[in-house]
Amino acid sequence: MALNSRDRRSGVDARALATLKATMAELDRDSPIYVRIATALSAQVASGQLSPGQALPSHRELARSLDVNLTTITKAFNLLKKRGVISAEAGRGTAVRGRDLNHAAPSYDQPRLPPAIDLSVHKLSVPGYQDFIGSLLRQIASRPDDLARLQEYHSAFGSNHNRRLAVEWLLSWGVSATPNQVAVTAGAQHAILVVLASVLTAGDSILVPRLVYQGVKAAAQVLGLGLIPVDTDEHGMIPDSLARLVGDPRVKAIFLVPTLANPTTVTMPLDRRQAIVDIARRNSLLIVEDDLFRPLASNQLPSLWSLYPEGCFHISSLSKVIAPGNRCGFLAFPERYGPAIASALRGSIWMTDVISLTLVQSLLEQKKHLEFVGTLRQQLTTRHSLALTHFGNALAKSDPESLFLWLDLDSGQDSTAIAEMLYERGIGVVSSDVFMIGKTKPNNGIRIYKGSARSDTEWDIALSLIATLVRKPE
Ligand SMILES: Cc1ncc(COP(=O)(O)O)c(C=O)c1O
């Protein structure tokens, strides 16, 4: 029911007014009338009776209709502005604030054949992994107890045993948490969705780096959340730029990938981590720390979770450091959010599949995860050295330990067009616009997964082809 079709006497739609009054009547009579007016209007926005962009009646009209004085309405509107529900724009009166998603979800359903050498996604399989998984599956098949575990439901967080596996996995990379603070998820993307669904509501906004992992755009789109880009430099989000944006009442959280970020490969140094945490703490903002590349870093810095345990969610998974086909992720969270996280887990997948978890258990028991990650690190640095022979300085900002290269392009070259030309020549890469928020193209570049070439020779061929097309920045 809308407030925009106006009654001749009061200027306010009569049916909308009746609903507003009915809602107010249900509210606690001890709270001040201006708070009840604001709460009733918020309820109309939340239920869709008032839609984004819709104009509200003037202060005077509403005061007359509700039989209250003008100051009461002014106070109610001020409260709604503070809560980010409405906004006043010069010459346009007061209106319901739009969700202003400011981003479009990337499309994954391109009906195109994959290119011959697809360096747009992570595919690497470390030698020995397939033998490991093959022998594990044979063992499971021969053990009745294991087979029995596969047919049962388990707790949404993961069984106690699996929560201890999560603790052990995180500790392998220098992150401490207790079993009560962790949950098992179906990969990092699922963990992101679970956290955002648990702690934010449609219309809230998240501060993200200007070039951001595109899966966050998809999750935000699904949940009706806005993304607001924060400027970055060679150390990640710039604290001053962040501080300028935290005053927006819609902003509730910060998302970042602090280690070997996707797509820029930047690792945030300790002083920058501390500065970001200080801002979050001062402004009661939550931090979503997506740290799935952490195992690749030889120098593991303190996690944001360790610096801000009361407000940070820490995410890890196996996909990038063991194999993407293992859909197992781990989430550490402040314990007070446990019930909300449990609901989001149940409401999404109920529980993580047990075969993936059985694999994690074997990896941890045999310390194979450390061996596989060690081999992966070597492969990545070897491929980086090869890439340097082709691109030199254009890779200056690309960390050798990263899973991918971030190749800066000359500002005269359009990265989207380059990615398209490469696709036509059989090479898949991703252009910077996929990671952008908003309309300006701040950073012209392409992301190239190192592990997805089937051999060093194929890697060399792909790089030679890319090098013939790209012009490096001066
Ligand atoms: C930064 C980041 N977070 C999360 C994911 C998703 O990881 P997973 O496969 O574990 O869901 C990716 C995958 O590319 C990523 O780059």
Image (cartoon, helix red, strand yellow):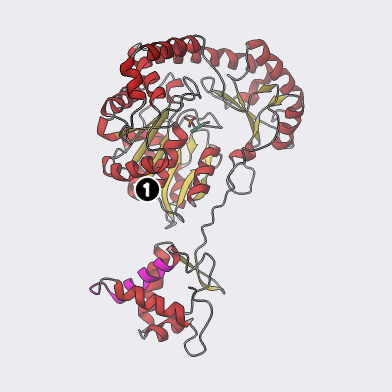
Magenta-span inclusion, residue 61: no
Please provide percent x and percent y for residue 237: 48, 40
Question: Which quarter of the picture shows residue 270?
Answer: top left
**Would you call the spot at circle 1 few (<14 residues within 10 Å), some (14-19), or many (20 or more)?**
some
Please provide percent x and percent y for residue 235: 49, 33
Q: Which residues are magenta?
A: 29-44
Q: Nearer the viewer, residue 269 or 207?
A: 207
User: Magenta segment, principal secondary structure?
Assistant: helix
**Residue where numbered disc 1 is placed:** 199
Which residue is painted at 53% across and 76% down in the image?
4
Q: How many marks?
A: 1
Res. 7 in view: yes
**Residue 62 located left or right of residue 341:** right
Please provide percent x and percent y for residue 35: 32, 71
Q: Quadrant of the C terminus?
A: top right
Which residue is painted at 44% across and 39% down in the image?
192
Please provide percent x and percent y for residue 246: 43, 52
Question: Which quarter of the picture shows residue 367?
Answer: top left
